[in-house]
Amino acid sequence: MLELRLSEPAVLAVRPGEQARRYVDVPSSCCCCVLRIVLRRLAAGADPVVLASCGEWPVVGLGLAPGQDVVRAHYVASGAFQRGEPVHELVVHAAEQRRTACGGEQFPFAVDNGNAIRWGVAVFNCPLMRCADAHVLLSAELMQSHAPLRTPLQPPLQPPLQ
């Protein structure tokens, strides 16, 4: 497993139909913080999307069976992906501890003797419309939040079939 360190962006290259996975550990003391995960495309020609799940890896399975494409995660930047935007952003409660599984490979969500909560972050390069390598900058940062998040939980995304 490769770590995505808070406030240290990582440059990733993702082939069509594949995903790059990183984890980010958030101090469990951040009860009033939000975790901001940002994907920024560095070149045009690919269709990347960022997904995040607490305590497990997001699941992506295209072409498994006719009409059964699957993309499951606790959070998906589906709006930015569907609009083809060059920047995708997820903002979630940092100390959230989900007990509902999305079906991905699970790992302990409380790590470092319970002092941190582990998030699985994936960048998937969707090959349905474009078939080029995705070159992206992925970052994660903590921000203070004194008000409840107004961003609704984004449902799992199933890409439109073409």
Image (cartoon, rainbow, N blue to C red):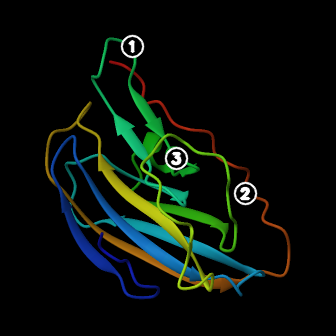
**N-terminal of the two: label 3 or label 1?**
1
What amino acid does circle 1 point to? Gly
Residue 58 image point, x, y percent: 44, 49
Corner quadrant of residue 96: bottom right
Q: Secondary structure at mark 2?
A: loop
Q: Which residue is mark 3?
A: 73
Residue 60 image point, x, y percent: 37, 39
Q: Nearer the viewer, residue 136 or 75?
A: 75
Of the 4 image quadrants, the one containing the N terminus is: bottom left
Q: Secondary structure at mark 1?
A: loop
Q: Which residue is mark 2?
A: 151
Q: Nearer the viewer, residue 162 or 154?
A: 154
Q: Residue at x 51, y 51 (%)?
A: 77
What amino acid does circle 2 point to? Thr
What amino acid does circle 3 point to? Ala
Q: Residue at x 63, y 81 (%)?
A: 114
Label 2, label 3: how many angstroms apart (C-alpha)? 16 Å
In the rendered image, the vertical position of residue 79 relative to residue 106, given as above or below: above
Residue 97 image point, x, y percent: 68, 64
Give yes or no for contact between labels 2 and 3 (Cβ–Cβ under 8 Å): no
Label 2, label 1: how many angstroms apart (C-alpha)? 29 Å
Q: Which residue is mark 1?
A: 67
**N-terminal of the two: label 2 or label 3?**
3
